[in-house]
Image (spheres, grey):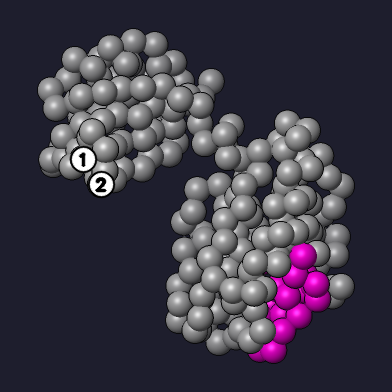
Amino acid sequence: MSSAINVICEDKPGMLRDIAGAVACRGGNIVYTQQFVLERGVNLGRSSVYMEIDGDTGGLVETLSDMPGIFEVSVHQPFDKIYGSRVIIIGGGAQVAQAAVGAVSEADRHNLRGERISVDTIPLVGETAIADAVSAVGRLHRASILVLAGALMGGRITEEMAKLQKEGIPVIALKMAGSVPQQADLVVTDPIQAGTFAVMHVARTAVFDIGRVRGKEF
């Protein structure tokens, strides 16, 4: 059984430790957490601590609510039940936009059948900016596949992409100049089709498997 809690608390040292300790005392296993300071709204300046927990969380809300420094505790569905698998698209603005069109259109088809697939995009310029973004994909929660959409990519971008592939995240690249296409799992000429392929790979209701066409170009 998996559930999620969100705690609004004071922004001070030790709060994350105290909340995690309360979860552990009740036998819960924290499988994902994020924390940030709220920058707007009625809780401006307070900290938001979100945790996804495996195990019985019965009584946890009451326990946390009674702790000093905690203002609000709420229970939610985990992110995988709401946003599901994430398709990440990085690269040049025009190419990213077209790849997103294909990905969003295909995701809609599968989400209507009860799946949850979301699409994240960021248009960037320059080897360093793109390489840093590719490197960060491995740290993104639920990231399932990366699409590199641009006209020229290589150097450190290719190096970071290879590391990402070793972590089990496949990469689709547009047909472009540079060394990225040689390292990519799949090369696709049409950006709309690239986005479509990416969603088809992560969708449970699709039959496309990038492993069966790895190294090919379409």
Question: Is residue 175 found inside the magenta-colored segment of the image?
Answer: yes
Marks 2 and 1 sit apart, C-alpha to C-alpha, by 5 Å
Q: Left or right: 53 with respect to 73?
A: right
Query: Residue 97: horizontal and vertical position, in percent?
Result: 65, 66
Q: Quadrant of residue 87?
A: bottom right
Picture coordinates of residue 25 (x, y %)? 29, 20
Say above or below: 91 vs 118: below
Q: In the rendered structure, find residue 39 and report the number of the disc placed on it.
A: 2
Mark 1 burial class by Cα count in 10 Å: few <14, some 14-19, many 20+ = few
Amino acid found under the numbered disc labelled 2:
Glu
For the residues labelled 2 and 1, say whether their Cβ atoms are less than 8 Å apart: yes
The residue at the point 46 percent across, 20 percent down is 55
Q: Amino acid at mark 1?
A: Leu
Quadrant (top left/top right/bottom left/bottom right) for the C terminus: bottom right
Horizontally, residue 203 falls left or right of residue 62, namely: right
Q: Is 77 located above or below residue 101 in the figure? A: above
Between 218 and 170, the one nearer to me in the picture? 218
Q: Determine whether 60 is above or below 176 in the image.
A: above
Residue 146 in view of the camera? yes
- The residue beneath circle 1 is 44
Residue that appears at 55% across and 87% down: 155
Q: Is residue 26 left or right of residue 15?
A: right
| Quarter holding residue 177 | bottom right
As rendered, which of 113 and 32 lies closer to the eye?
113
Q: Magenta includes 172?
A: yes
Q: Which residue lies at the image location 61% right of the left edge and 84% below the top edge?
A: 153
Q: Return the disc, 2 or 1, that comes first in the chain's sequence.
A: 2
